[in-house]
Structure formats: structure tokens, C-alpha cells
Amino acid sequence: MNSISNGIIVLDEEKCMGCNKCISNCPIFDANISYTINGKNKIKTNPEKCIHCGKCISVCDHDARDYIDDTENFFNDLKQGKNISVIAAPAFKVNFSNYNRILGYLKSLGVHFIYDVSFGADITTWAYLKAIKKQKLETLIAQPCPAIVNYIQKYQPELLEKLAPVHSPMICTAVYMKKYSGVTDDIAFLSPCISKHDEINDSNTKSYVKYNVTYKKLKKYLEKNAIDVARYNEQNFDDMDCSLGYLFSRPGGLKENVEAHTKGAWVRQIEGQHHVYNYLKEYSSNLSAKKKVPLLVDILNCPYGCNFGSASCNELSIDEVDNKFNTEKEEKLAEKGKRFMKKKIDWLYENFDKTLKLDDFVRYYDNNRTQSEIKEPTEAEYNEVFNKMHKETPESRRLNCSSCGYGNCKAMAKAIFNGLNVLSNCIDFNRSEIILESKELANKTEVINNLDELNKLSKEKVNTAEKLKLRVNEIVSAVKEVSRGNEECASSIESIANEVSDILNTSKVLKTSVDEMKHSLGNYKNASEQIVSISSQTNMLSLNASIEAARAGTEGRGFAVVADEVKKLASKSKEVAVSTEADQHIMLQIMEAILKVSDELEDKVNKVNDHITSSSAVIQEITTKGEEISNSAEQLITNNI
């Protein structure tokens, strides 16, 4: 169990369900602090703010809250042989039907004296009336209830002067025992109240009482230790019998005591956490406004008085308890009649006047006003908190479902602002969160559906990528093949270009040779022309010789034969020369044709060379692009496309 002790209130975190009942039932706005642990809401008390009214313990359905008292210490000290006497609140009789045997059990453990606090209540009533008269008090707030005293000291210290200047019945009993009965023991109080711990430990009660032994813890102690009190003899109280002081433990009990002595006194009876603290504010306001207020305020924190106090274990109904007190009252009145009871009360008070000193029972109080850390948010700060609570409209800010425990949304916003509560403790916030989460879930569902679709597409993409990978591999292979082909083609083109260059060179050589032949043919033509010229001249000479031979007659006949032969030779030379000239003309035509073909060949070879150069550049560019494509494709494959 992970227990957190804040003062005398203990929280069992594991049992705490964060239901906020403690907050809604607490009379103090900031006495509870809500927090989260492992995502779960928990609520602990703030000891500086708590007045120990005990309401949070009684309303907790999960047994998550408990309190600490002095029961264990009391019994341990008894076992150690310490001198202890006991006083018991009037509620003891209705919380334990076998209370006389419990008294017997305590006596068997070594308890010396046991007094009924009802007797101390008689002293308290006497002291109230005495103080009112002596100090001329116009109004008084009764203080038997330490939770009421705690509240006034912490939250309405302006009312301290109105608190009864007299000790509670518990302390009055202890004072009487120590100052008037000579009891020197430590005193234990059998108590129905958690907050009696605060009164006992208050410096103004001077340690008259040491132990707050509550009924609930006493009962658990007896059960845990298997103590059968039926085995012990019955014992009665050791004090003188009280008058009506035993009525203090029920609502209006003080009022009944005062009315029994002072008729017509205005006594305000009020009890219960949901009433008394609002009443005190109203009472203070009336005092400030100088309005009429009751002479005495009979005020108790617990709704049904001390008989059902914050540490009681009463299993009787309210009416059953009331009936027991009424029966005891009737029995007292019936002993010797109402007149006798009146005389007994008067005698008791007269005896108190003679034997008691009012100053011995005077109570002082300290101003324990808490240094409130509660800040009132500005309008902007309220808006900021409300927006965090998803309360963005005036209607949502006035929802006031009370599930947070504060009763209205503005108080919850104020608590969150001051760090007393958390957003997750607002049911409307959680509802809004659920709506937002539903929308988000719907969006997530859509996203999931989209993811499913995306997964399908992804699978298709993977398949496509695999196919693409294969295609890319094929492209890479093809590009590499083309690249290799281009390289071979480029090599072949380079060879062709070299061959064409050789042809071009040969053509140039041929052209040069043809030019030289043409030149030589020109020379041959000139020679042929000279031969024809020589032949003509020879023919003329032959003719002249024939003429001269004819003239010579017989002597010239031989020379005529030679002239005739020369003439024939000249004629033959001329024919040959003429024939050669024709051939020469044909040869010139052929050479012109060869030159023309050579020029055309050169032109075509140049064009072919230009195309080859251009093709080589294109092939080189294609090869470069092919390599880039190949590299990109390989990178795609490496990156899984």
C-alpha cells in the first residue's frame, strides 16, 4: 500500500479512484489537491488547509482515506506501566452497547480513573453563562467542536473574539481532574472525533489531555487483538453524576442545557458541513452590518452531532440514538420531578460557583489564518484555462455538472489555474477529448485504409520496380551493346575515313599525273605539228627536186627517183602526223573526261569525309549519352529503383 500522510489524514493511493466525492463534500475549496499518477486521478489533502472535519473519510466509498489517532500509543503506554486515566465523551454510551465492560477492560489494564465528559459539559455550560454575564457578552460561538475552531482560526479569524472563552467539555473535564480531583495521570480521551487531535495538541490546552483514542480505532484494536470485553466486569464512571451535560453530544444539546437554566435565551442550533461554514460567513456579515445575532450559536461540524462524529462507530439509527438520550433525560427528570432536576442544576451551578474558578477553564485562541495561495484568475487567464478544457462557448462554461466536485465550471477553472486540480478531472473535458479522439480515430482509420491501399500500391510498385529493374537491366545491356557497336562503328568509320583519305590522296596524285600527261601531250602535239610542217616542207622540197630532175633530164632521173621517195616519205609522215593528231584529240577528250571524273571523285570523297566526320561526332555523342543512361540505370538498380 502506498500511503500518503498529510497531517492526520492518510491516503491509500491504490484505493483512491479519483471520484471527487472528497472534493464535493469538503467545505474548504483548496483543502484537496487532485493529481495524476500513471495516468490515474488521485486526490490528497492539503494539511495546511484541512480543518479535519472528517467528511472526506465518511463519504469515500473506496476506503482510500483514513486518519491517525493515539490508540496504539495509548495501549502501548499502558502496557509499559504508565499512569493513565481516561475520560469518555457522552457519545461513548451509544457507540458501544457494552461500554461498562469496556470500562472494566480498561481498568484491568491499569487505568486509574474514568470520568464522563458529560460532567465536563455541565462545567462548560456553567462557564458559558458565567462568562456571558461577567463579560457582558452579546453573542458567543460555542466551541466544543474543534473542526469549527480550526475553521475560524484559519479562515475567519475575525470571529475569534466571538468564540467562547471557555474550554470544551473534554478539556474542562481534564482541568477538573487535575486541579480539583488531584489526578496526576496522563489523560486519554475516548473520542468520537478526528479533529480532537488538533485541540489536544494546541498549545492553549496546555497538554491537559495526551491521547485521542477514537471509537473507530478502539473497536478495531479490540477486534484485531481478539479481546472479548464480555469477560470483564462492568465498571461505572468515577465522577459525580452529571445533570444534562450528556446532551452535548447530540444536535441542540447545548441549547437544551442553556434553556434548562436560562429561559428565553436566543440559541441558534446549526450543524453539518454543508450548513455551518456558510452560516459563519453570514453570521460575520451580520456582525459587520451590526444586525442582531443569537446570544449563543450551538454549532457542530457533524450533521448528527458527536454521537455520529467523524471517528464514531455507531451502528444505531439517528432515531434510536435520540430515543436513548430522550429516555435518559426522562429518567433524570422523573427521579424526583422536574422541580428537583431544576434544583439539582441550580445546586450544581451553585457548587461550581463555590468550588470552581472560571479562570481555570478559560480558553485562548491563535490566529492561524492560512497564507492563501489561491489567486483569482483574470478574465484572460480564465479564458486560457477554459480553452484548455475545450470550453470555448459561454454555454459550455456554464455546464456546472459538479462531477469535478466544485459545483461549477468556473470554480474548476480556478482550481486548475491554482494547481489544485487537473484537466483530466473534468468530465466534460474528457467527453470532448473522446470526441476529438473519435475524430482522430476516424482519421486514423482513413489513414489506415489509405495505408492499406498504399501498401497495395507499394506492392504493385515493388512488382513494377522489379519489372522495371529487369527492363533497365535490358536497357543497360542494350545500351552497352549499342555502345560497343558504336565503338566498332566509330572504328570502322575511322578506317573508312582513312581509306577515303587515301583515295582522295590517290585522286590528287592521278590529277597531278593527268596534268603532267596533258602537258606532255601538249608537247607531243607541238612535235606532231612540227612533223607535219616538216613533212609539208619536205614535200615542197621533193616537188622542187622533181621539177629540177625533170629539167635535168636523164641526169636528173636518179635524183627524180629520190625526190619521189622523199615525196612518198613526206606524204607518209604527214599521214602519220595527221593520224596522230586525231588520236591526240581523242586522248585530250579522254583526259578531260578523266580530269572531270577526278574532280567529281574528289568532291564526292570530300562530302563522304564530311559525313563520316559528322557521323563519328554523332556516334561519339550517342556513346556518351549511352554511358550516362547506363550509369543512371545502374544507379536506379543500386537504389532499388
Image (cartoon, rainbow, N blue to C red):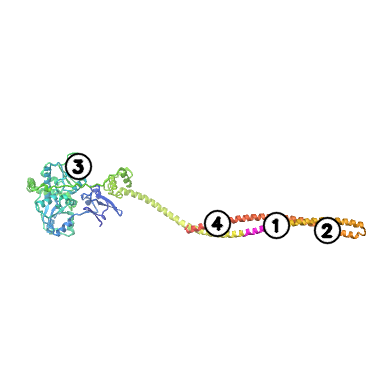
Upstream in sequence: badge 1 or badge 3: 3
The residues bearing labels 3 and 2 have C-alpha atoms spaced at a distance of 174 Å
Label 1 to label 3: alpha-carbon separation? 141 Å
Q: Is residue 249 visible?
A: yes
Distance from Cα at disc 3 to Cα at disc 4: 101 Å
Mark 3 packing: few (<14 Cα in 10 Å), some, or many (20+)?
A: some
* Residue at disc 1, secondary structure: helix
Q: Which residue is mark 1?
A: 512
Q: Which residues are magenta?
A: 495-513
The main secondary structure of the magenta stretch is: helix
| Disc 4 element | helix
Q: CA distance from mark 1 to mark 4?
A: 42 Å
Residue 58 appears at what percent x and percent y?
21, 51
In the image, residue 568 lies at what x, y percent?
Answer: 85, 58
| Amino acid at circle 4 | Thr
Between circles 3 and 2, the one closer to the viewer is 2
- Badge 4 crowding class, 10 Å Cα cut-off, few under 14, some 14 to 19, many 20 or more, is few
- The residue that label 4 is drawn on is 624
Viewer-side label of 3, 4: 4
Please tell me how crowded label 1 is: few (under 14), some (14-19), or many (20+) other residues with Cα within 10 Å. Answer: few
Residue 535 position (above or below residue 355): below
From the viewer's perspective, is the residue at label 1 or at label 4 nearer?
A: 1
Q: Give left or right: position of 112 versus 591.
A: left
Q: Which residue is mark 2?
A: 572
Q: Which mark is residue 284?
A: 3
Image marks 3 and 2: residues in contact by CB distance under 8 Å:
no
The secondary element bearing badge 3 is classed as helix
Labels 3 & 4 near each other (Cβ < 8 A): no
| Along the viewing direction, whichever of 199 and 94 lies nearer the viewer | 199
Magenta highlight on residue 502: yes
Q: Is residue 324 visible?
A: no
Residue nearest the observer in this picture, 593 or 10: 593
